[in-house]
Amino acid sequence: MTNLMDFHTHILPGIDDGAKDVDISRLMLKSLADQGATLVCLTPHYYHNQETKESFLEKRAAAYAQIEAYGKELELTLALGSETHLTRDLASERDLTDLCLGKSKLLLLEFPYGCEFKADTLFQVERISNNCGVTPVLAHIERYPQLIKKNSKPLAELFDIGCYVQCNISSFASNKKLIKLLSDGIVNFVGTDCHNMDSRSPDFQAGVKAIKQKLGESFWEGFLSEMRDRSKRIAITQPIQQGGQT
């Protein structure tokens, strides 16, 4: 595999429940490079109701500084971003662009576990999209049964808002519904959602194998090309944030 893009990772050291130190981060980056990745999005968890955005950006910058040189050594493009948890008051920030991937307007957005996708949830997503000028990318939708069922009304409404969809690549090996969503053009991005080198490693192999078996290699190559086209500005890495200042 070549020219892979990992849209969703927890590689930055010591910032969330992902890589616990720089050594693990380096192993994760090396694994992705060996698999043919060229662009790796660094998306640590951000919880607006637990810390300020400025504090998060400062910690993210410090963590990134520890792996930046190694990423260049591996000839990887590393793009800063976040996996931002949806909270009721998130839209109060007004400007969320520094949480988006690279210089894009793509915000990886995580719903709460057990989310029922009622009208209030959809309203919150719409506020974030309209008030903050970002395009939400729904993280790992396979975790939410209401979004992957046939003719999902909540998913259709989220599409109407302008959202994109991300799935974890490993899930394609065990979830036939995702193969159907992919073939129907519902899935826009894939990522490993890697957290370590053990239970949640950066591994594309099984998922890509399942996709190729069901949809063919040419389909997979076409999807990769489309994903890269959607991601052009992601490759333009944000300036390092220091104390919330650009």
Image (cartoon, helix red, strand yellow):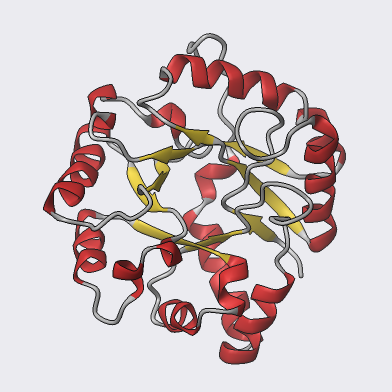
Q: Position of residue 108 (x, y in %)?
A: 44, 45
Q: Position of residue 176 (x, y in %)?
A: 49, 84
In the image, what residue occupies the spot 25% across and 42% down? 129
| Snapshot quadrant of residue 171 | bottom right
- Report the residue that reaches farthest toward the front: 114
State left or right for residue 80 relative to residue 164. right
| Snapshot quadrant of residue 142 | bottom left
Q: Position of residue 178 (x, y in %)?
A: 47, 77
Q: Position of residue 121 (x, y in %)?
A: 20, 48
In this rendering, the answer to whether 179 lies above or below 19 is below
In the image, what residue occupies the spot 31% across and 25% down? 95
In the image, what residue occupies the spot 56% across and 15% down? 58
Give the quadrant of the N terminus. bottom right
In this rendering, the answer to whether 57 lies above or below 84 is above
State left or right for residue 230 relative to residue 26. left
State left or right for residue 129 relative to residue 3. left
In this rendering, the answer to whether 185 lies above or below 109 is below
Viewer-proximal residue, 12 or 100? 12
Q: How many marks?
A: 0
Viewer-proximal residue, 159 or 2? 159
In this rendering, the answer to whether 65 lies above or below 138 is above
Viewer-proximal residue, 233 or 21? 21
In the image, what residue occupies the spot 39% across and 81% down? 184
